[in-house]
Amino acid sequence: MTHSTSSALSDHYLNLPGARLVATSATRLTLRHLKFALAARAMMCVHGGVGLGKTVAVRTNLRDLAPDATVHLQLRPQAPLGELHTILVQKLGLPPDADPTTALPQALATQPRILFLDEAQGLTNQALEYVRYLWDAESTQLAVVFVGGENCHRRLRSRAALASRIGAWQQYRPLTPDEVLTHMPTYHAVWKDVSTTDLLWLDDVCCHGNFRHWAKVTYHLHHALQDDQLTDKTVTRDLLWEILQDVDSTVRPEHRHGAGTDRQ
């Protein structure tokens, strides 16, 4: 994937300098599902815990696959249907006084579009049914991607007519220990020469396979290594322990010298 520097930086939590997008097995599967949704004008759902990289994977892949066709929406939880109408009118570049009843289906019929609905578990029943109505309309050329947290799957499944139209479901899970060892040195250069034991220890006591947790630790470590007062730039267990005090104050002292993880 190729992105502008500003766009790529904003993809990372905390705008972490030097961070790279990594192709995990989950993000590769997301890419395959997105290609299916675009080709078939289908609906799909990506769901899972917070901080696992769902939104980044969808956003960056759609930037490559359909940069001019993607309509990215994130409504506040339980926003009324009128708010969805208003935002869609704005995103599609329609006049502010356009009647959404006719203007939105007509606008979505002019060219293929992919509707990317983030934090979809917060959509009201009315909003979900309206998305289904737009997708069902014979005139529209619409694909839909729902992205949401752990309860998004249950939320969409509770709308039987909508769920029956979703052609692909994907659950994101934490990185396995093997994936941590594979991807963290690629994710950021600060991990390149860190021992596998320390990487697994850090994942076990703090990060738990969660990309957002890893980003926090990486951000603090990156800036610590830029500090002129730090004469030894080697990433040691002691330095990592100091970083952890800023990231997670609940980590207990007895974990400081623990070995790697047995988490699978």
Image (cartoon, helix red, strand yellow):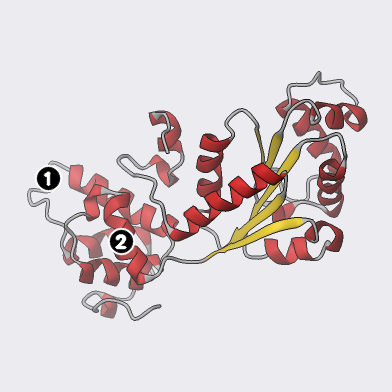
Q: Kindly identify the residue that appears in the image at 85 percent across and 32 percent down.
A: 105
Q: Residue furthest top?
A: 95
Q: Amino acid at mark 2?
A: Thr
Q: Taking 172 as reference, is 2 left or right? A: left
Question: Of 198 and 173, which appears nearest the observer?
Answer: 173
Question: Of 148 and 136, which appears nearest the observer?
Answer: 136
Residue 89, placed above or below residue 234: above
Element at badge 2? helix
Residue 107 falls in which quadrant of the image?
top right
Q: Amino acid at mark 1?
A: Gln
Q: Is residue 117 visible?
A: no
Q: Position of residue 242 (x, y in %)?
A: 24, 61
Question: Of 13 and 174, which appears nearest the observer?
Answer: 174
Question: Of 154 and 86, which appears nearest the observer?
Answer: 154
Residue 220, placed above or below residue 92: below
Q: Kindly identify the residue that appears in the image at 46 percent across and 41 percent down.
A: 11
Mark carried by residue 182 = 2
Front tag of 1 and 2: 2
- In which quadrant is the N terminus drawn? top left
Q: Position of residue 150 (x, y in %)?
A: 62, 65
Residue 70 falls in which quadrant of the image?
top right
Tell me the residue that label 1 is attached to: 229
Q: CA distance from mark 1 to mark 2?
A: 31 Å
Residue 254 falls in which quadrant of the image?
bottom left
